[in-house]
Amino acid sequence: MRSGEQPGRAVLRRSVRGQARRVGLGAALGCVHQLGEALVPVLIGVVIDQAVAGQDAGRLALWLAVLAVMYVALSWSFRLGARAGERGAEEAAHTLRLAIVRRVLDARGGAEEGRLPGELANVATEDAKRVGAVNMALMSGIWAVAGITVSAVWLLLTSVPLGLIVLLGTPVLLWLGHLLSKPLERRSEAEQDRAAHASGVAADLVAGLRVLKGLGAQQAAVERYRRTSRASLAATLRAARAESWQTGLVLALTGGFIALIALVGGRLALEGSLTLGQLVSAVGLALFLLGPLETFAWVNAELAQGRASAARVAEVLAAAPAVVGGGDPVPDPVRGELRLRGVRLGGTDGVDLDVPAGRLTGIAVTDPASAEALLRCLGRETDPESGSVELDGVPLTRLDPAELRAAVLVAAHDAVLFDGSLAANVAPGTEPWSGPAADGPRDGTAQEARDGATDPRTERAMAAAHADEVARSLPHGVATGVGEGGRSLSGGQRQRVLLARALRAGAPVLVVHDPTTAVDAVTEARVAEGLRELRRGRTTVVVTNSPALLAVADRVVLLDGGRIGAEGTHAELVRADAIYRTAVLT
């Protein structure tokens, strides 16, 4: 095990141990149930010896009443025990899901590195469920041990040879079952890996469906998913074959074990060492043992799959953060002055840049990679390879990432909308209800009123981004559902809603990247004026090559070849710098 996985393993152990009390209760009730199950064939043997063989109707009625009470106790103990075990399994899985989501949403990032979103969803659902099921498996294993122990004790008291067969044979069967579960564990891990990858590819393709259609690449995308799905299917079939072999072999071994008990018991009865009732009890216990031994086979399979899933969960929980350090609070109040010194990362090559507080600064680029690297540094998604980025004179590496993100909001060009109403997307988390809005006409209920309500802050942001025009064009205004990823909106409409969301947040420092690439020229000019007016007096950085947006900036910086190439107003740079003209006007 890699040392980096230790924190993840600790969370796994806590999720299982956290249900110890509930699993313990379930195990105790299950042991009562197993005790009763094992006593049923014993009582039947007593009935045969004391009532049937002696033809005593009174004793027969008495023992039948005892059996009836026993079955009532069996029913309730199993029901309550199984309920406690299932609840323990579900709550352990829920605890793990929360831990995975917290890790994925951690401001320091890193959990998503090298993983598609669908893969993370698979880990948080299927793998967490399998690990949670370990609680039920452990409880069932305790039940099985209790049942075998009771059977072995009674057989020892009745016949030493029969008791010894159970006591010596059961550990051998368990050891063989453990060996047989090894191939299942390996193949189960491969199955989950392939299934997670297939889920990730499917989610990726669905998210990019419009682009694929535009490029005419649907067939290539379908073929890619077909290959991935076939690989997942092959891994699933291999795991299923391993599970069937393990189950079949364990059942065969168990059947031979029970046959041996019945054979020895029958021989002892013929020799007179056992009464007829004791023989019936011995055979009944041998048949009863089939249940606990099958349970052990199931427990082995569940533990094998649980271990495979636990390794994947631990890998996500123990993922190294993308950025390290930083626990200081942001300056209070935030003036909003940004300073970059010698920043090198990706497409940037020693950038020195000062962004004055309270001003609108435009940044034009000749290489999109430079813009991406700059945005990642400003949002502290990645720390620069060398150099530093400061907010109000404090290096970002010293600041708490969560507080930093609230102070410096980087609105990426490829941000997504959520399934819900337009209002809920512009002001997420502020409405009483933010689920999917209805697509058809509604009857003016209180639900619709909540769904369509907007506060003055939201209205100002929507007006500045001209997203209010988008709302007026929709059948139910801001209460209209936009669909998953905003698929019911055009590209320009989505951009205006995304910009409205960024403006509505009201961060002291706002960095936006190409917010109007899909908007017509007239609307773009109006959006530029609205952005400037709403953000007046607060630090705003617009990374774009749009002349309309750069024209309203107080100052424009050209990032050329990963370095600062020129500075000035948009008009000055258009007149004096040929590289700027080429980047912005062509």
Image: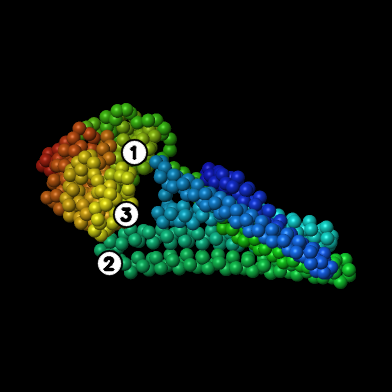
Q: Is residue 162 above or below residue 6?
A: below
Q: Which residue is mark 3?
A: 436
In the image, what residue occupies the spot 65% across and 61% down? Answer: 295
Q: Name the element at disc 1.
A: helix
Up the image or down, 2 lies above or below 204; here it is above
- For marks 2 and 3, give the CA distance: 31 Å
Mark 2 in CB contact with mark 1 (< 8 angstroms): no
State which mark lies toward you, 2 or 1: 1
Q: Quadrant of residue 247?
A: bottom right
Instruction: Give the image location of residue 41, x and y in percent.
Output: 74, 64
Instruction: Report x, y in % for residue 527.
Output: 16, 45
Label 1 sits on residue:
405
Q: How many marks?
A: 3
Alpha carbon distance from label 1 to label 3? 27 Å
The circle drawn on residue 216 is 2
The residue type indicated by label 2 comes to Gly
Q: Foreground mark, 1 or 3?
A: 3
Density class for disc 3 (Cα within 10 Å; few <14, some 14-19, many ≥20) is: some
Label number found at residue 550: none
Identify which residue is drawn at 16% across, 42% down: 530
Amino acid at circle 1: Arg
User: Farthest residue toward the front?
Assistant: 58
The quadrant where residue 339 appears: top left
Q: Position of residue 259 (x, y in %)?
A: 75, 70
Residue at figure coordinates x 18%, y 35% from the top left: 536
Q: Position of residue 451 (x, y in %)?
A: 27, 49
